[in-house]
Amino acid sequence: MNESILKPLSAAVLRLFRPLVRILLRNGVSYRTFADFAKWVYVDVATKEFGIKGRKQSTSRVSVITGLSRKEVKRVRELPRPDDSASVESYNRAARVIAAWRREIDFLDVEGNPAPLPLEGLGSTFSELVKRYSGDMPVRAVLDELIRVGAVERLENGRVRLLVRAYVPESSEADKLHILGTDVAHLISTIEHNLKADPSGLLFQRKVAYDNLPNEVLPEFRELSAKRAQALLEKLDTWLAQRDRDVTPSVKGTGRNRAGLGIYYFEEPYIEEES
């Protein structure tokens, strides 16, 4: 590899690995287990994305591309793929229910805010909301999950009131780790695309940051950024929902694509050079 590329790439990978390794060590994942994860992805990507058109990707070619021995490639191919489908489904269903509650006119009050909903009955009920936007998930299971994370509450009159603007799994480690896997992957995929794309095909990737801020400024900036970011995301959610064929079946068009916008907040003490 060209030395001018290897040095910044190595530095970037070290920065990327540092918070990831903290999470791995905190959850008891050894280097050997992590190495198997890395090998599995190397083999999978080399097999699916670096083949020769019209030819099956052989073990020998994967070995050459990845630097792993043929024996190791065969061993890694037999490893089970880690599965977090239960967490993915739970997170997606809860998020869809809350987003629809904020967005769909059937579940809003006269002022355009999420209305407190009767649990069951005719018309706009919590049960109807769940049936429309969480697939075949039992209504009680969705309600219990949203109560557990503090997203909704049961009122004395039996209605269900929404307390948050978005689903954030406060206590579920599995759901939080699912977010790690999806959100970080989306960001890196965007950066990877922009590294090879021509200027006309770049995807939006921006941030704003300053490095000499006093402690007293941070709470105000947290509140300001959260408020502005949430408002933007809700506006984009409404726009996308009107064009997604799962939410709006009348939408026509070809292909199937995933698109969105992610926003994250960060703060940390300034360190001249992290060792």
Image: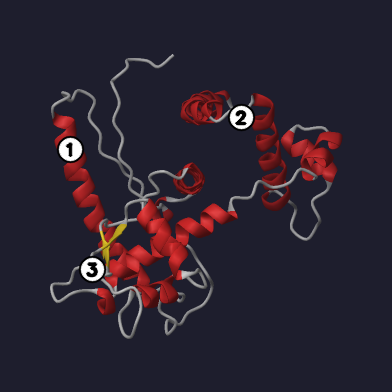
Q: Earlier in the sequence, mark 2 or mark 3?
A: 2
Residue 185 % position (x, y)? 50, 46
Asked whether residue 261 is in view, the answer is no
In terms of image quadrants, where is residue 69? top right
Residue type highlighted by circle 3: Pro
How many marks do you count on the picture?
Answer: 3
Residue type highlighted by circle 2: Val
The circle drawn on residue 29 is 2
What is the quadrant of the C terminus in the image? Answer: top left
Taking the spot 47% from the left edge, 50% from the top edge, the residue there is 197
- Which residue occupies the foreground of this view, 192 or 176? 176
- Which residue occupies the foreground of this view, 222 or 90? 90
Taking the spot 51% from the left edge, 25% from the top edge, the residue there is 14
Q: Compared with residue 226, is residue 35 higher up or lower down, i.e. above or below?
A: above
In terms of image quadrants, where is residue 55? bottom right
> Element under label 1?
helix
Residue extending furthest toward the front: 156
Taking the spot 75% from the left edge, 53% from the top edge, the residue there is 52
> Element under label 2?
loop
Residue type highlighted by circle 1: Phe
Q: Earlier in the sequence, mark 1 or mark 2?
A: 2
- Which residue occupies the foreground of this view, 188 or 179? 179
> Element under label 3?
loop
Asked whether residue 227 is in view, the answer is yes
Residue tagged by mark 3? 114
Taking the spot 50% from the left edge, 68% from the top edge, the residue there is 137
Residue 42 % position (x, y)? 68, 40
Q: Are marks 1 and 3 in contact (CB under 8 Å)?
A: no
Check disc 3: other Cα within 10 Å, few if <14, some if 14-19, many if 20+.
many
Residue tagged by mark 1? 221
